[in-house]
Amino acid sequence: MRAGPSNASPLKSSLIAAMLAMVVILLLSWPQIAAVWADGRLGDTDDAMRMAQIRDWMAGQNWYDLRQYRLAPPEGAPMHWTRVVDVQVTLLIHASGLLFEPARAEIAARLTYMFILFGFMLWGAARLGRMLAGPAGVAPAMALIAASGLMFGYMQFGRVDHHALQMVLLLFVWEAAVRALDERHAHVAAIAGALVALSISVSVETAMMLAGAGALAPLNWVARGEPARKALLWLSISLCIALLICGALFIATNTSGPAACDALSSAFVFAGLSGAGAMALLYIASPRLVNWQARLGALVFAGAGALGVVLFTYPACAIHPYAAMDPLVRAIWFDNVPEALSFTSMLAQDGTAAIAFVPPIMLGAFSLAFAI
């Protein structure tokens, strides 16, 4: 008879922690919320360009036409932002339009969008905290989110840049990838694969973090063998199907020239399919690989083969994705973008920003590895 209350207690504690975290987030963000609601201000030029892309699509621009005709007229400049965020914000604009006039509906949608993302961020943190540390890990995980200065740099109310969605997806990708290490939950690797494809569709800036999550299943298989074999198949099938769907939905069809190496393109779909194929081969060969040395050798061979095929097919992606950028544009713009700087360059230019960016990521990586 006492099983019910004892089971309900962790859920009740989690809900209380989530509500407290959201209250803290709203209190810290209230000046920003009020300012956006008052005059509709945008966070930066990325937000302005995103809203221009959304408005053009709502005005009739083709789904697959990602050119921004306000730039380099009359041909326009190709944009490497897909419609993933556009769809979400547009739906919220239409929903807000039931209550507000168009200009106010757009502002309400932008505020609502970030509120929803914060909710998912707390949910993802709670799931990851519970999995790694049990019920006692839920509240600290959400508290870290609610008090994270790094996160508030990108997740400001009124912003519609893609970075916030990327961070949310990263949490759920890693949660699913870690959960799938338990052979009883090997099927959860399929969720990780699907979310990796969706995240790549948003932007490829987090590709290395996604690759790290995707490497957990093969490395677990190397260490444990047959008990960890099923996760390879789930991840392979899911990644293959999801990449094909995302490619069909979100790759622009009005561009010419080689595939883009800095955004979702045939190059990234092909790379993902090559990796998925390599994992499928490892799954098939697993019964013959009786020790970890053989499995590690097979993983290295399969991985090198998949990478070699990708670089042979898309040699342009072996160099810097912005190698063809005009030197003047690079000097004025790209070399001053914080996200594009190496840690040493960032440290030289802005030590405070470097300390804010890098240590939390390193601490999180070490903590996650230790918990696994």
Image (spheres, grey):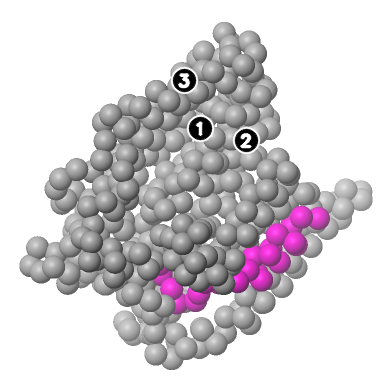
Instruction: Nearest to the eye among marks 2 and 3: give it.
Output: 3
Helix, strand or loop for the magenta stretch, by majority: helix
Q: Is residue 281 visible?
A: yes
Extent of the magenta region: 136-161
The percent coordinates of residue 308 (x first, y second) are: 35, 27
> Residue tagged by mark 2?
180
Between marks 3 and 1, how big is the CA–CA gap? 19 Å
Q: Residue at x 49, y 67 (%)?
A: 348
Amino acid, disc 3: Phe
Above or below: residue 304 compared with residue 135 = above
Q: Is residue 256 left or right of residue 316?
A: left
Q: Residue at x 51, y 53 (%)?
A: 169
* Residue farthest toward the bottom in the current orientation of the protein: 38
Between marks 2 and 3, how big is the CA–CA gap? 24 Å
> Residue tagged by mark 3?
301
Above or below: residue 39 compared with residue 263 = below
Secondary element under disc 1, as helix, strand or loop, is: helix
State the residue in front, 289 or 319. Answer: 319
Q: How many marks?
A: 3
Amino acid, disc 1: Leu
Q: Which tag, 2 or 3, sits closer to the chain's start?
A: 2
Above or below: residue 91 compared with residue 43 = above
Q: Residues within 10 Å of mark 3 (few under 14, many from 20)?
A: few
Q: Is residue 45 magenta?
A: no
Q: Is residue 221 left or right of residue 320?
A: right
Q: Quadrant of the C terminus?
A: top right
Q: Is residue 145 magenta?
A: yes
